Structure formats: structure tokens, C-alpha cells
Image: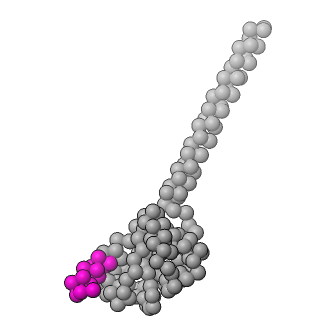
Amino acid sequence: MERAEKREFVTELNEVFKASGSVVVAHYAGVTVAQMNDFRSKMRAAGGTVKVAKNRLAKIALQGTESEGIVDLFKGQTLIAYSVDPITAPKVVMEFAKTNDKVVVLGGAMGSTTLTADAVKSLATLPSLDELRAKLLGMIQTPATRIASVVAAPASQLARVFAAYAKKDEAA
């Protein structure tokens, strides 16, 4: 890589660290090219990206970002997985790590919060943003239907009472 390419790469990676919802750092020693391509395609389909970067360049790119606390994770063969949605990158990395024991999650960052490997695992178990929105919408709609049935119930009961009095008056 030439010096200009390195500068451009560092600038691009710096923007990635600033804009990403979450960043996951993992070791990938022993992963085949086919497995890595499969991993990249799964991440791309979910809305994230996987990059293999030189540790020195990644450390330079981290300077001046909120994720600067993960500098110590860049030792050995590391890859960076990131996404705008904070849940996507950890979820896809953990799913891939389950099927491939050569991928070892080291940690990551979510904004200014530095994540350990266990924190990345627990973040991966959370539902995605779309799932949370669907659950929230369901929770909002349920009380509305209950309120409608409760409000309608007294009216229907009153109608039955009036009908009963009307029948009583007719009979009398």
C-alpha cells in the first residue's frame, strides 16, 4: 500500500468509527477465504460491513473518535465488523462465531462505551431495532383495543337495561 492509499484508508476508517452504531473486533486466524466471503455476504445482507485492516492503521483511525478505548484490542490478525444499527454487527458476528470456532470475538465499542467479549455476546441476544419497534407497536395497540372494549361495554350494558325496561313497560 502506498502512503496516499494508507492516508485515504485511515480517513475512511475514521469516518466509519465516527458513524457506526457499533464496532466489533475479532480474531480470524485460520478462516478460509470462502468462509470469509460467506461472512461478508451475511453481514452485508444484514446491513453491516466487515473489514480486515492493519492494526497500526486501525489504531491511527481510532484517534479522535468516541471508540478510542478499543485500541488495545488490535493485536494479531483482527477484523472489524460494524453497522449503523447497534445490534446488527454483534448479532451477525456471534452467529458466525458459533459455526466457526476460529473467529474469536475480542470486544468492541458502541459509541463511547467500550464492550468486552461478554458484552458483545449479550448485545447480540437483544432484538433488532425493527423487532423492538414491532413489539412496541403491539404494546401500544393492545391497550387501545382494551380501552375500546371497556368503553363500549357500558354502552352495550345500558342498551340491554333500556331494552329490558322497554319490554317490561310493554308487558305491563
Q: Taking 131 as reference, is 40 left or right?
A: left
Q: Residue at x 74, y 8 (%)?
A: 170
Question: Which image quarter: residue 152?
Answer: top right
The answer to whether residue 22 of the structure is visible from this angle is no
Q: Residue at x 65, y 31 (%)?
A: 154
Query: Is the stretch drawn in magenta largely helix, strand or loop?
Result: helix
Name the residue furthest right.
172
For the N terminus, the image quarter is: bottom left
Residue 57 % position (x, y): 33, 87
Residue drawn at point x = 21 percent, y = 84 percent: 4
Instruction: Indicate whether 14 appears above or below 21.
Output: below
Q: Find out whether residue 13 is within the magenta segment.
A: yes
Colouring style:
one colour
Q: Quadrant of residue 135?
A: bottom right
Q: Quadrant of the C terminus?
A: top right
Q: Nearer the viewer, residue 122 or 163?
A: 122
Q: Quadrant of residue 51?
A: bottom left
Q: Is residue 26 above or below residue 20?
A: below
Can the viewer see residue 162?
yes
What are the residue bounds of the magenta stretch? 1-14
Q: Would residue 159 be counted in the magenta stretch?
A: no
Q: Position of residue 28 (x, y in %)?
A: 49, 83
Residue 18: x and y in percent read: 34, 75
159 and 172: which one is in front? 159
Q: Which residue is at a point 62% across and 41% down the rendered structure image?
A: 146
Count the numbered circles shown: 0
* Picture layout, residue 34 above or below residue 159: below
